[in-house]
Amino acid sequence: MTQRENYAVRLKELVNQLAEEGVVVEFDSDLVDDVGLSSIEIMELVEHIEDEYDISFPLNDLA
């Protein structure tokens, strides 16, 4: 598996942790419409991604 594929799989796992029970998360799922994430849950997802990959998203880019 390539590094890009590894990232994609891990991101899908993180989304699954926040998804409503019974929701099937696909790589092309819309986080709000398909997965049912709230804006707060999306911010939690961003925080998990930042922590896991030791990166930071500028707040302006998140709006």
Image (cartoon, grey):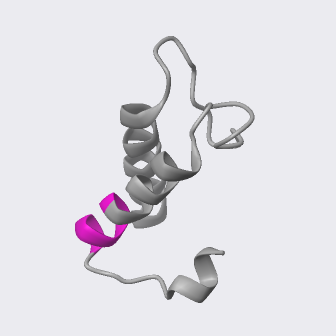
- Residues rendered magenta in the picture: 48-53
Q: Position of residue 27 (x, y in %)?
A: 62, 42
Res. 2 visible in picture = yes
Res. 1 visible in picture = no
Q: Is residue 49 left or right of residue 58?
A: left
Instruction: Give the vertical position of 15 relative to 3 (above or below).
Output: above
Please tell me how many numbered marks the rendered image carries: 0
Instruction: Give the vertical position of 29 relative to 11 (above or below).
Output: above
Residue at image coords 75%, 35%: 33
Q: Is residue 10 magenta?
A: no
Q: Position of residue 46 (x, y in %)?
A: 43, 63
> In the image as oriented, which residue stretches furthest toward the top?
22
Residue at image coords 38%, 83%: 56
Residue at image coords 64%, 43%: 31
Instruction: Give the vertical position of 57 relative to 1 (above or below).
Output: below
Residue at image coords 59%, 75%: 62
Q: Main secondary structure of the magenta part?
A: helix
Which quadrant of the structure image shows residue 35? top right
